[in-house]
Image (cartoon, coloured by chain):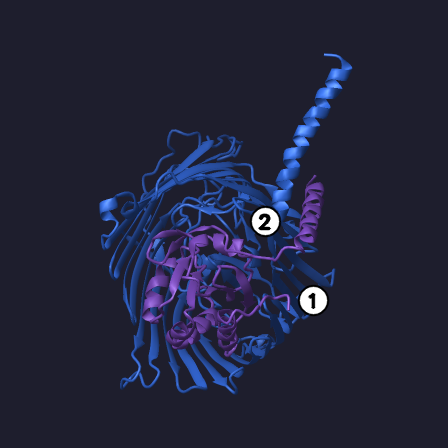
Chain colours: A blue, B purple
Amino acid sequence: MNKTTLLKSFKIAVLFGFFPFLGFSQNLLNSGSVQGNFQLDAQYYQKDSTIGANEVSEKMLMNAFANIIYSNGNFSAGLRYESYRNPMLGFDNRFKGSGIAYRYATYKVDDFDITVGNFYEQFGSGMIFRSYEERNLGYDNAMDGVRVNFNPLQGIMLKAIIGTQRFFWDVGPGIVRGGDAEFALNDIIPSFSDSRTKLTFGGSIVSKYQPSEEILFDASKKYNLPENVAAFAGRVNISRGKINLNAEYAYKVNDPNSENSFIYRHGEALLVSASYSKKGLGIILTGKRVDNMAFKSKRTEVGNMLNINYLPTLTKQHAYSLSAIYPYATQPNGEMGIQGEIVYSIPKNTLLGGKYGVEIKLNYSRATSIEKDTSGLNIIGYEGGTKGYRSNFFEFGNELYFQDFNIEISKKINNRLKGSLSWVNLIYNEQIIEGHEAPSVYANVFIADINYKITPLKSIRTEIQHLSTKQDEGNWVMGMLEYSIAPLWFFSISDQYNYGNEIDVKKIHYYNIGVGYNKNSSRIQMSYGKQREGILCVGGVCRQVPAAYGFNLTITSSF
Amino acid sequence: MKKIIFIAFCLFITNFGFSQTETPKTKKLPSITIKTVDGKTIKTSEISNNGKPIIISFWALWCKPCQKELSTIAEVYDEWQKETGVKLVAVSIDDARSSSRVLPTVNGNNWTYEVLLDVNGDFKRAMNVNMIPHTFLLNGKGEIVWQHTSFAEGSELELIELVRKLNRGEDISEKK
């Protein structure tokens, strides 16, 4: 082939390449849509040695992100730009920087749905695989790879994933791959479609690969580490009328890692729930067992990053500031947990219910250790390491990790006044949950939340809370007053006072004043005051928040 | 390389936005596979209400203002439905920790909404929800015409007024 024919064919190729693209882009421009959102959090820090708020050399720290999604028919693509200049206190400093942390493209064709790039996904309840994000906690284990969803028949859903996991601005060293299948029997078998009993079952398998590395058991022996670790799970959901049953069991082969002190024991988890509900009454019982189920794509990683799975916590997530002082988080190395809840509405126009009815919520949860027998375990077949322990699957351990009994009664008095009263009684094993030497905390919390409507759009809300305990920091009292002009404005003033602290200089007022403005899907919120050091938990992940003092700004917007 | 992708994407978007000005903006619901509270799998693009408006409200069991919004609307929901034909779809973003508690709570509270479980936030992300409560209003054609975050007593009055306007055929788009 000489030069001119080469040039000619090149021109033709360009021409042919260009025209379809032009047509395509024309099409993209005419019928697609762009959506997105944005959030910025910034704080100006002031030093306050009494609460332990240190000087911040940047004076001001900021976290921000923006998502942009373009979609057109069966195609969509998106990205998220994140900026931490520098990460706010409480966020891992390894987030420092700016850039595109998340980008993907998805195409749907016939029964397939293909994603390349980053994605979030969950198999069943997530006990062997869940990638997700909690932006407000700095938690993100997005996958970077490929996902294929296939829906061959009504009622059959197949998923396959492969990729690595986000690790700050990089990815972890392990490869995660897996598949999930779910069958909804009532959709698959035509004669079942009208049955009152609904049956769905599913199963999944996930495997991680990480090359072996040299980790010493003692001065002369090193661990023989498995490079591939597989996990399996099966689940079933049955519902009939008012009754709903859910169960999932997960199994993981031996996976010596830093979280489990390099033992060669398998991992297991079971989650079951049964509920009965009808109009005005809901009852649910749940139970779980977790045994050696830390599953990360890097065997030496500890903490919140590179989790492959998610182990749900079976305790109520409290929404008031004093009842949320002592939150619980699942102990992946071993835990038995139960929870029960009753939600009941006393009907309107009855003796107890009054004109508007009364709502009652009762909740109880308890988490303990698992039984562990470490006797007679020899070093087994490997150069180092043992099976760790034996454990009876159905036996509760002796150590109490957490217990919570709480009741909430809500009542509307008249068209202007309504409110709720709550009592929370909890036991919090500080040594296990926070990992430092301390006695367990026994606390009682009382909360009154009252709402008064001045005009149809203006209302005042007040919260009065009291926490009493002889342990940890002692008693707290909290008051809050909020004034709102719907739907645009919020003003609030609050104070948390640790009056029961044994140390006089720690009897501190944590005051805060704030204002918020909402217009459609945008919100600006400013506050000034002191923030208590503690654990902040959202959606199952907890983060230690340092004490802070200063001015805080949040802007959030969707378009 | 990342910067180049970003610039290209921005150019693409701005270009797109520019050419878009001539055609009316219609945002419909994305197609996300999601479960109903009784375990059925549906696609969010199939949410419909016989040509009447739809309210979509994102909430969670740990979110007090969200539950206030839903219980405030529950008191007047029958009247709203009779008057305007509007339907409310309550999308719970509770994850596996508490998603099984959603159905007993909804029933125990006497809520008659259609309830969906967005356990891994797929629908939430596709709708660009940052904070909850986040409420969307769809017109009879299934187009998203209004959205709002947060709830204060009285916000429901604005919401139903917008539904009435939609039924009268008025334009309530955010551009105004």
Closer to the camera, B25 or A342? B25
Closer to the camera, A34 or A36? A34
Residue placed at 73% from the left, 63% from the top? A59
Residue placed at 60% from the left, 44% from the top? A103
Quadrant where the image shows the N terminus of chain A: top right
Say what secondary structure mark 1 lies in.
strand
Residue A442 lies left or right of residue A145; in this view the side is left
Please provide percent x and percent y for residue A376. Answer: 32, 39
Q: Which residue is mark 2?
A: A31
Residue placed at 46% from the left, 53% from the top? B45
Q: Is residue A97 visible?
A: no
Please provide percent x and percent y for residue B97. Answer: 40, 57
At label 2, which amino acid type do we have?
Ser
Q: Residues within 10 Å of mark 1 (few under 14, many from 20)?
A: many
At label 1, which amino acid type do we have?
Tyr
Closer to the camera, A165 or A328? A165
Q: Which residue is mark 1?
A: A45
Please provide percent x and percent y for residue A482. Answer: 55, 80
Residue placed at 55% from the left, 64% from the top? B145
Instruction: State the CA–CA distance, disc 2 to disc 1.
Output: 47 Å
Seen from this angle, which residue lies furthest top? Answer: A1
Instruction: Using the image, determine if residue A498 lies above or below residue A139.
Output: below
Of the image marks 2 and 1, the number of the one nearer the N terminus: 2
Closer to the camera, B100 or B38? B38
Say what secondary structure mark 2 lies in.
helix
